[in-house]
Amino acid sequence: MTALAGNTQHIIELIYLVASALFILALKWMNTPATARRGILAGEIGMVLAIGGTLLQQGIVDYQWIAIALVIGSGIGVPLGLVQMTAVPQRTALSHAFGAFCVTLVGTAEFYLGTPSIPGFKMSVLCVEVILGGLTVTGSLMAAGKLQEVLPQRPITYKGQNFVNLALLASTAVIAVYLVHNPGATHLYPVMVGIALIVGVMLVIPIGGADMPTVISLLNSYAGLSAAAMGFVLNNKLLIVAGALDGSSGFILSVIMSKAMNRSFTNVVFGAFGQVAASAAGAQEARPVKSASPEEAAGILAAASKVVIVPGYGMAVAQAQHKVRELYDALSKRGIDVRFAIHPVAGRMPGHMNVLLAEADVPYDRLMEMDDINGDFPQTDVSLIIGANDVTNPAAKTDKSSPIYGMPVLDVEKSHTVMVIKRSMNPGFAGIDNPLYYMDQTLMLFGDAKVFVSNIVKELSASHS
Amino acid sequence: MGSTLIDGLFVFMLAAFIGFEVIKRISPLLHTPLMSITNALDAIAVVGAIVLVGKHESRLSFILGVLAVIAATSNIVGGFLITDRMLRMFKTSRPTKP
C-alpha cells in the first residue's frame, strides 16, 4: 500500500515536471505573434496535465465537490474571457484579485489545519503568502474599480500617507514574526490578514489613471510571488515555478512601465501623481492655438506622404479604434505610408493600444515602438495624435520644472505638421499643460475622437470619388 | 525540512532567471496577452485548492478550498480564452490569403 502511494506520488511529481516545462515553453512562444498561439496550447496542456495529476493524489475522497467547483469556476471564467477589448485592463486587475484570493484562501486553510504545530519555516512562508495575497486581492479590486470607473479615478492623498502605509506593512511583519514563534495564536492570524487587506486598499488609493500600467504590473508580480510562496508552503515545485515565472513577468513589466514614465518603483507606489499635478495646473493661461475643421484636416492628410498616428487612452475611451482603422485604410489606399507610434505607457496597461488596434484589424507590423519610430518624425509629414497627451509633451525634454521632466516621449513636434484630436483645451488626466498645442506647426482638432475621425474619413472618401 | 527549503529555493531561483530571460524577449506588442496568459498559468494554484477540497479535513478548509477552486478555475478558463481571442486579432499586412 505504501509502495503504491509512493509510486503515485512519483508519477504526480513527474507530471508536474512536464507541466513546468510546458509553462516555460508557453511563455517562450509568446515572444512573437507567429508562435504565440502555440504558447497558449502548451499552457493549456500543462494545466490539464497538472490538474489531472493532482486528482490522482492519495487521500482525495471528495471528487464530487471538486467537479462542482471546477464547473462553477468555468462558468464565471467564460464571460470574463469574452469581455470587450476596451475592458481588458479592469478584467486583468480583477483576475489578479481572483488569483490572489485563491492563494490567500488556501494559505488560511493550511494555517487552521496546521495550528498550533506549524514548523517555523512553513509558517514564515505562509505569512508571506497571505500578506502578499491579501494586499493583492484588495489592491487589485481597487484598481479594477478605478478602471471600471465605479470608484473615483482621482488619486486620493493625505498628509502622512506613506508613513501610515509603512506602519501598516510593518505591523503585519511584526505579527508574522510572532506567529512564526507562536503558531497557536489563532486570534492574531485574522488580524494580520485584515491589515494586509487594508494595506492593499491604501496602496492603490493614491494611484491615478496614468500610473495604472505600472500598478497592474506590480500587482501581477505580487500575485505571482504569493503563488510561489504557496508553493513553498505546500512543497509543490510546479507552483514555485509558475509563481516565479508570473512574478518575474510582472516585475519586468513594471520596470519597463516605470522607466517609460521616468519614475522609480517607490515613486509610483509611494508618490501620487496628483500632488505634482495640482501645482502644474495652476499655471494655466489663455494662449492662442490654431484649430482646423475635418475638411481641412482631411486635405492636409491627403497631401501627405508619410503619416504617423499616435493613439492614447482617449482613443480607447471614445471607442474610436475602428474609425481609426477606416482612416488607416482610406489613407493607405491613396498610397500614403501610415504607421502607429505606440508609447509604452499609452493606455491603462502594458500593450493596451496594440490590442485595441489589432482588434480593429490594423496589421501589427504597422505598430511601432517608441524607440523605433522616434528617429522618423523629422521625415514625417503629419503626426495625428488621438487621445494621447503626456506621452507627446515636449516639456518632458526641455522644462526642468515640469512634473514629467525626463520621461521619454514621442518626438511628434519634429514632424512637419502636428494634428491633435482633443475634446477641449482642458489639460489631460495628469493635469499637465502641453506646450505642443501652442506650437506653430500644431493644429487642434476639437471634438470627440470617434466623430472627428469618421468626419475625416467621410471627407477623404468624398474627395476621392 | 532544511533540504526541502533549499530545494525549493533552487527551483525558485532558476525559474525566476528563466522567467527574466524568456520574458525580456517578448515584444511589447504582446504585453497585454502576456499578462493574461501568465495570469492563467499562475492559477495553477488551483492544485493546492483541489487537494483541500478533496481531502475534506475540516469544514473550514473544505469551504475555503471550494471558493479557491472556483476563483482559480475562472482565471484559468477566462485567462486562456481571452489570450486566445487577443492573439487571433494580431495580423500582418503581408497578405496570407488571396
Image: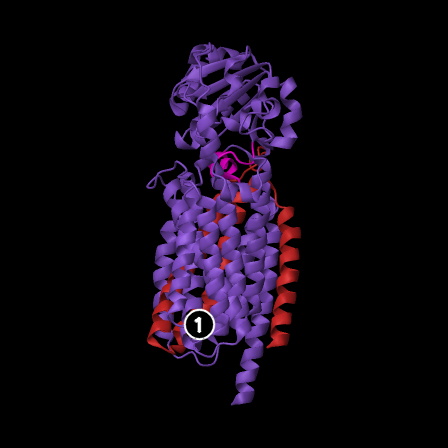
Chain colours: A purple, B red
Q: Is residue A355 left or right of residue A369?
A: left
Picture coordinates of residue A128, whole percent (x, y) = 51, 63
Quarter location, residue A258: top right
The relative height of residue A314 versus residue B2 in the rendered view (above or below) is above
Q: Residue at x 53, y 88 (%)?
A: A2
Disc 1 residue type? Glu
Q: Nearer the viewer, residue A229 or A336?
A: A229
Residue A15 on image: x %, y %: 56, 70
Locate residue B12 relative to residue A153 in the image: left or right.
right
Q: Which residue is mark 1?
A: A110
Mark 1 falls within which chain?
A
**Are there few (<14), some (14-19), or many (20+) residues within 10 Å of tag 1?**
many
Image: magenta residue range: A343-361
Q: Position of residue B27 (x, y in %)?
A: 61, 42
Residue A345, relative to residue A50: is it above or below? above
Q: Is residue A349 visible?
A: no
Element at label 1 = helix
Can residue A246 be seen?
yes
Q: Nearer the viewer, residue A448 or A101?
A: A101
Q: Is residue B46 magenta?
A: no
- Residue A425 sits above or below residue A33 on the image: above
